[in-house]
Image (cartoon, grey):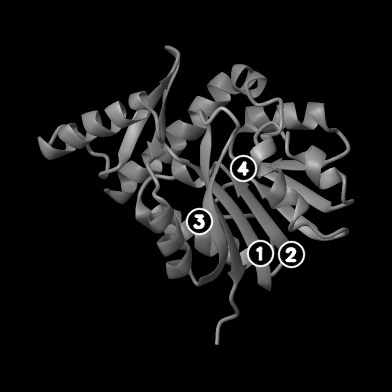
């Protein structure tokens, strides 16, 4: 994908989330219980944690239980405003995932829940992971999830945009789609496979500790997850 087009898509994604922030937040009030283990098994009391792509701040409830030194960031100003209203005791700020406003080796762990699939082009995805690596302590842990697309509607979108790409009618990369949020916006997504996500993390210099796919009880929500160590540069 052309880099300038990728940057344009990222800007449009941010603007889109600003536009739908209130109604999107309503759909993200509850914790997804199938992801609880990523917090229960890996958090240590008193750690310095970055919640990257925090949205309306809903995951703060899990961090709060272990008295974490917490910072939540998101590129959507409107979602950050909602997070600040919901949890005024927490630290939230607007930030660009490609240029985080933190010094090197600042956090013990970084959580990135359902963010990376919104970043267009492998070049920008790698850049975002390198930025994560920069602000994470050597030996620190990245815990990351992306959506696993699995239903008929999603595969129809994948088929549609693959055909458009093949006939020269789409500037997207293969495995990229736009999905409508009502009639307001079309959100950009990249269809990750577990193998691709692992490969991207390794390419950035992360050491994979654990990965897999997790589903909710109904099976209508699926996420690829990754737990990776920030391997020190030798």
132 to the left or right of 104: left
Q: Pointers 3 and 2 in contact (CB under 8 A)? A: no
- Marking on residue 53: 4
Q: CA distance from mark 3 to mark 2?
A: 17 Å
Q: CA distance from mark 1 to mark 2?
A: 7 Å
Q: Around disc 2, counting alpha carbons within 10 Å, would you say few (fewer than 14), some (14 to 19), or many (20 or more)?
A: many
Q: Identify the mark nearer the N-term, 1 or 4.
A: 4
Q: Position of residue 65 (x, y in %)?
A: 87, 45
Residue on which the image places disc 2: 108
Q: Nearer the viewer, mark 1 or mark 4?
A: 1
Secondary structure, mark 1, is: strand
Residue on which the image places disc 3: 128
Location of residue 233 (image quadrant): bottom right
Q: Identify the mark nearer the N-term, 1 or 2.
A: 2
Residue on which the image places disc 1: 141
Q: Position of residue 122 (x, y in %)?
A: 36, 54
The answer to whether residue 98 of the structure is visible from this angle is no
Q: CA distance from mark 1 to mark 4?
A: 16 Å
Q: Nearer the viewer, mark 3 or mark 2?
A: 2
Q: Around disc 3, counting alpha carbons within 10 Å, would you say few (fewer than 14), some (14 to 19), or many (20 or more)?
A: many
């Amino acid at each position: 994908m052309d880099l300038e087009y990728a940057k344009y898509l990222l800007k449009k994604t941010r603007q889109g989330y600003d536009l739908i922030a209130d109604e999107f937040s309503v759909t993200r009030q509850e914790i997804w219980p199938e992801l609880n283990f990523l917090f229960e098994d890996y958090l240590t009391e008193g750690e310095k944690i970055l919640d990257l792509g925090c949205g309306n701040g809903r995951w703060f409830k899990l961090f709060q239980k272990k008295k974490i030194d917490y910072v939540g960031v998101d590129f959507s100003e409107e979602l950050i405003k909602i997070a600040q209203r919901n949890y005024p005791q927490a630290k939230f700020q607007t930030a660009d995932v490609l240029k985080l406003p933190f010094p090197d080796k600042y956090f013990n762990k970084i959580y990135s829940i359902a963010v990376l699939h919104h970043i267009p082009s492998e070049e920008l995805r790698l850049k975002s992971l390198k930025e994560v690596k920069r602000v994470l302590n050597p030996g620190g842990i990245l815990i990351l999830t992306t959506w696993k697309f699995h239903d008929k509607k999603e595969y129809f979108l994948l088929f549609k945009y693959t055909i458009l790409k093949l006939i020269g009618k789409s500037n997207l990369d293969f495995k990229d789609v736009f999905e409508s949020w009502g009639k307001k916006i079309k959100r950009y997504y990249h269809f990750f496979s577990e193998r691709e996500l692992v490969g991207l993390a390794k390419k950035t210099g992360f050491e994979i500790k654990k990965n897999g796919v997790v589903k909710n009880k109904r099976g209508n929500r699926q996420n690829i997850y990754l737990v990776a160590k920030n391997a020190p540069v030798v």
